[in-house]
Image: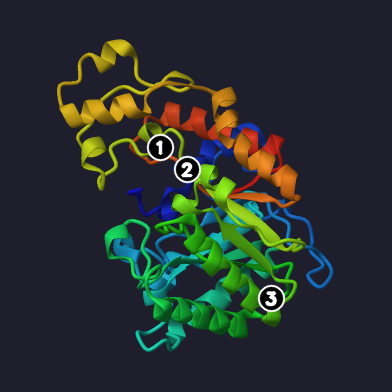
Amino acid sequence: MKRRTYRTHLIGCILMGCVLLLGIISCGNDDNTLDEADPECSVLPEVDWEHDSFKILKGVNISGWLSQTSTRKVGVDAFFTKKDAQKLAGWGFDHIRLPVDEVEIFTEKGEWKEKERGLIHKAVEWCKDLNMRVILDFHILRSHYFNDTENMTLWSSKAEQDKLSDMWKKLSAEFNQYPNSLLAYELLNEPVPDTPGQWNKLSSRLINELRVLEPDRMIVLDASSHSSIGALSTLEIPQNDPNIILSVHFYTPHLLTHYQAGWWPALKRLTIKLHYPGQLVSHQDVDTIRDSENLRVVNYYNGYYDKAILTEKIQIALDKSKETGLQIHIGEVGCIENTDPTVRLNWMSDVAAICKEHNVAFSV
């Protein structure tokens, strides 16, 4: 699945409407903007880190900082700061998902990059001070990039699997000092194995090894096939381990959430009016499409979408949560800035409402 790199300066335009309309924050500014957090607004409860559990509901991906950094326009020190974390806490978010890439934090010899190691510690400490949780997400490996399945070596190379195991042991050794209620580990973002069994075998190994080191650390386990909801049916989940969160991603329908995505040629060239809720592209507008590739993509994703339909799409995850007793985390959800603002707002508002109604955690 070809996808974007989200940048923190887009948070406001993506979230403003759903945050204000749905009350996912407890308070805000009088002018209903998200430009500044209200310093007098205590939106998050105090946490007893030693005795509390890892509880999350609404969060933000800090993308482009230590992962997928090609669009980062400023230096790493300025891209995400304590002030940014304070804004997120002031808006009512209770966690961040912190994606990190192997190439950003480890040398080719597997040694820590000291500056980046320090930045991760800073982010965790900022969140601790602000009563926010952190999901440390191993996003991209040198052997596994979800947008380049042809050049993956993780699934065919035991050496690369051993390397991933070693890196998680280093991550554990570095960050086990933090309370289990503060920090969780996400084993691998959007695994794309040749067969589900490959991910089941590798994730089981990683979990078993981490459990020796940290028996009670919360571990986030993604479904395969780009963390798709449908792949939950083939995911092997550890038995009798309550410290697991099941993670999926939600971008349905892709024509809406990835409209005119620059990395997707058929969408990049597309100019068509979208509707949500309702028929995504009207039949009259479909008839005006002359480009065969545009038409193929529109016909593939077109259909009627509303809150009820989106709930049906998420239902597999809701059922899996009920079956296992484990929380579902939508680790990525959002809509590209190219989509009409009203459509984007309507869609994101419905997704946020669904998550709130069913106690599903999400990270935009």
What's the CA distance linking mark 3 and mark 1? 37 Å
Q: Along the polypeptide, which appears first: circle 3 or circle 1?
A: 3
Q: Along the polypeptide, which appears first: circle 2 or circle 3?
A: 3
What's the CA distance linking mark 2 and mark 3? 32 Å
Q: Secondary structure at mark 1?
A: helix
Q: Residues within 10 Å of mark 1 (few under 14, many from 20)?
A: many
Residue 296, x across and y down, in percent? 25, 28
Name the kind of residue labelled 3 in the image. Answer: Arg
Identify the residue under disc 2: 334
Choose between 80 and 109: the one closer to the eye: 109
- Say whether marks 3 and 1 touch (CB < 8 Å): no
Residue 78, x across and y down, in percent? 42, 69
Q: Residue at x 66, y 55 (%)?
A: 94
Name the kind of residue labelled 1 in the image. Answer: Thr
- Say whether marks 2 and 1 touch (CB < 8 Å): yes
Residue 182, x across and y down, in percent? 70, 68
Q: Residue at x 84, y 69 (%)?
A: 51
Choose between 53 and 77: the one closer to the eye: 53
Query: In this view of the protein, can residue 24 be seen by the observer?
Result: no
Query: In this view of the protein, can residue 195 be seen by the observer?
Result: yes
Q: Residues within 10 Å of mark 3 (few under 14, many from 20)?
A: some
Q: Residue at x 78, y 56 (%)?
A: 45
Q: How many marks?
A: 3
Image coloring type: rainbow
Task: Say the numbered circle drawn on residue 257.
Answer: 1
Name the kind of residue labelled 2 in the image. Answer: Gly
